Image (tube, rainbow, N blue to C red):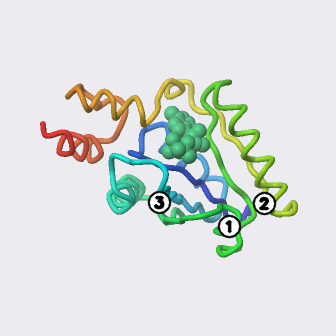
Amino acid sequence: MSKGAIIYPGSFDPVTYGHIDIIKRASKNYDTVYVSVLENTKKSPLFTVEERVKMLKDVTRDYDNIIIDTFRGLLIDYAKEKDVHMVLRGLRALTDFEYELHMAQTNYLISQGTLETVFLPTDLEYSYLSSTTVREIASFHGDVSKFVPESVAVSLYKKFGY
Ligand code: ADP
């Protein structure tokens, strides 16, 4: 059954196996998956948007229905521009739920009911995994090979000079 397009927005600073699991599962169920890096001026990211896009392109290159993109401003405006009506978010634990529920309800409200959010529960294997943890471990020159693909690990090692 064809399900059209979906947007998976996030910071992806950097992309982890948790994100990749969600992206792969979405690619099986939707015609097109936009993985959209938010250019958030309020956060000070470790990687530039260009670096994050490059890493995402690298780890998804075997999938022809995944588009790596960037956006700034409101998600509803970006979704309208792309003519996409579905947003995908991953849920790791109950702690994610409240924030994600509020975001989903807000987007539904301010889009006048045109932008829906769907949630995919994370694979148990990755439920503890976050970009924050990965950055923290890498900053102390720890081994991140269990959390991110090799190309991303190399980028982290370079960033932290080891
Ligand atoms: P944001 O800063 O918008 O939360 P992230 O890059 O941290 O962006 O996460 C993007 C999306 O990926 C969110 O929906 C988040 O819940 C989900 N996500 C993050 N880590 C994992 C993981 N380990 N397993 C599944 N989903 C995850």
CA–CA distance in space, label 1 to label 2: 8 Å
Residue pictured at 81% horizontal, 63% vertical: 111
Type of amino acid under label 1? Ala
Who comes first in sequence, dot 3 or dot 2? 3
Who comes first in sequence, dot 1 or dot 3? 3
Type of amino acid under label 3? Tyr
Ligand 1 is within 8 Å of the C-beta of the residue at disc 1 = no
User: SS class of the residue under badge 3?
Assistant: loop
Residue pictured at 47% horizontal, 63% vertical: 68
On the image, numbered disc 3 is attached to which residue? 63
Indicate whether 142 appears above or below 78.
Answer: above
| Observer-nearest of 74 and 120 | 74
User: SS class of the residue under badge 2?
Assistant: loop
Type of amino acid under label 2? Leu
| Whole-percent x, y for residue 155 in the image | 24, 47
**Quarter placement of the C terminus:** top left
Residue farthest along the left direction in this orientation: 162
Q: Is residue 139 left or right of residue 29?
A: left
Q: Which mark, by number, is residue 79?
A: 1
Quick check: can you spot residue 140? yes
CA–CA distance in space, label 1 to label 3: 22 Å
Who comes first in sequence, dot 1 or dot 2? 1
Q: Quadrant of residue 140?
A: top left
Indicate whether 9 appears above or below 73.
Answer: above
Residue farthest along the front direction in this orientation: 42
On the image, numbered disc 2 is attached to which residue? 115
Q: Is residue 139 left or right of residue 57?
A: left
| Whole-percent x, y for residue 132 in the image | 42, 33
| Whole-percent x, y for residue 127 in the image | 54, 26
